[in-house]
C-alpha cells in the first residue's frame, strides 16, 4: 500500500504515521525529519534547507523531489508524511510512482496553533506558525481537491484523542473493520 498523509502543520501527521507504520510494518518516509537531520548535521543541503524552515517557508520543489526519489526507490509499500506539499511535488511524485490512498487529517486552525505552541520545536514560534498556516492554505490545501478528483482521498477528523484518530484512520484505510 502506498499512502500519503496530508493536513495542516500540527494536524498530527507525524504522530499518526509513526503509529500506523510500526503497527502494520509499513516503511515511513518523513520529509520534516529528513530535512531536520540535514540541518542538524550541518550538511551543505542542511544549510540551504535551514533558511526556509526557520521562516516557515517551503523548501524548493527541486530539492524535495530529489530527496524523495532517493528514499522511495525500490519500495512497493510506504507512508509519506509531509510530502507532497505543493501541486508541483504531487505531479513530480506521479512520475515516480502511483499512490493508492491519501489520508487527509482535518483539524481547525485554533487547535493546530494550540498544539504547536505546546510542542515548542525550533519552528513552533507564534509568527512562524502563522506563516506555516498561510503557506499551507496557499500551497498545500489545493492538493485536497486534486486528490479528491482522482477518487483516492479519505477525510479523517483529527480532533480527539490520539487513539481515536488512529482508529478513524485504520477504518478509512480498511486496516480494521
Ligand atoms: P513537518 O515536520 O512536516 O511538520 P508539521 O507539519 O508541523 O507536523 P505534523 O503535522 O507532523 O504534526 P505532529 O504529528 O508533529 O514540517 C516542518 C517544515 O519542514 C515545514 O514548515 C517546511 O519548512 C519543511 N518541509 C517539510 N516537508 C516539506 C515539503 N514536502 N516541501 C517543502 N518543505 C517541506 O503533531 C503536532 C503536535 O500535536 C505534537 O506535539 C503532537 O504531540 C500533538 N498531537 C498530535 N495528535 C494530537 C491529538 N490527537 N490531540 C492533541 N495533540 C496531538
Image: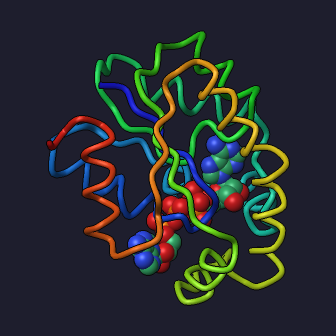
Q: Is residue 34 above or below residue 142?
A: below
The figure's colour scheme reads: rainbow
Of 27 and 12, nearer the camera is 12
Give left or right: position of 73 versus 59: left
Location of residue 2 by image quarter: top left
Query: As drawn, is 148 to the left or to the right of 143?
Result: left
Ligand 1 is in which quadrant of the figure? Answer: bottom right
Report x, y in % for residue 19: 25, 57
Q: Is residue 81 visible?
A: yes
Furthest residue toward top? 95
Q: Position of residue 95 (x, y in %)?
A: 60, 10
Residue 44 visible in the current orientation:
no
Q: Is residue 106 left or right of residue 166?
A: right
**Front in this rendered view, residue 75 or 5:** 5
- At x 30%, y 37%, the residue is 173
Query: At 58% across and 14% down in the image, what residue appears?
Result: 94
Residue at the spot 46% in from the left edge and 42% down from the top edge: 103
- Residue 86 position, x and y percent, is 74, 36
Please state the horizontal and vertical placement of residue 34, each as a whole percent of the image: 51, 50
The residue lying at 57 percent from left, 33 percent from top is 67
Image quadrant containing the N terminus: top left
Which quadrant, please, contains the C terminus?
A: top left
Vertical relation: 143 (above or below) 48: above
Amino acid at each position: 500500500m502506498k499512502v500519503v498523509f496530508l493536513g495542516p502543520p500540527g494536524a498530527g501527521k507525524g504522530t499518526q504515521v509513526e503509529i500506523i507504520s510500526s503497527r502494520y510494518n509499513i516503511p515511513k518516509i518523513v520529509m520534516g525529519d529528513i530535512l531536520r537531520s540535514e540541518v542538524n548535521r550541518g550538511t551543505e543541503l542542511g544549510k540551504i534547507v535551514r533558511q526556509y524552515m526557520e521562516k516557515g517557508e517551503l523548501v524548493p520543489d527541486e530539492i524535495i523531489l530529489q530527496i524523495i526519489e532517493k528514499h522511495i526507490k525500490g519500495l512497493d509499500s510506504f507512508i509519506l508524511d509531509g510530502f507532497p506539499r505543493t501541486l508541483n511535488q504531487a505531479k513530480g511524485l506521479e512520475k515516480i510512482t502511483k499512490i493508492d490512498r491519501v489520508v487527509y487529517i482535518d483539524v481547525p486552525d485554533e487547535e493546530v496553533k494550540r498544539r504547536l505552541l505546546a510542542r515548542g520545536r525550533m519552528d513552533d514560534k507564534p509568527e512562524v506558525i502563522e506563516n506555516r498556516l498561510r503557506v499551507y492554505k496557499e500551497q498545500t490545501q489545493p492538493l485536497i481537491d486534486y486528490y479528491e478528483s482522482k477518487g483516492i482521498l479519505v477525510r479523517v477528523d483529527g480532533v480527539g484523542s490520539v487513539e481515536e484518530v488512529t482508529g478513524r484512520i485504520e477504518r478509512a484505510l480498511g486496516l480494521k473493520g
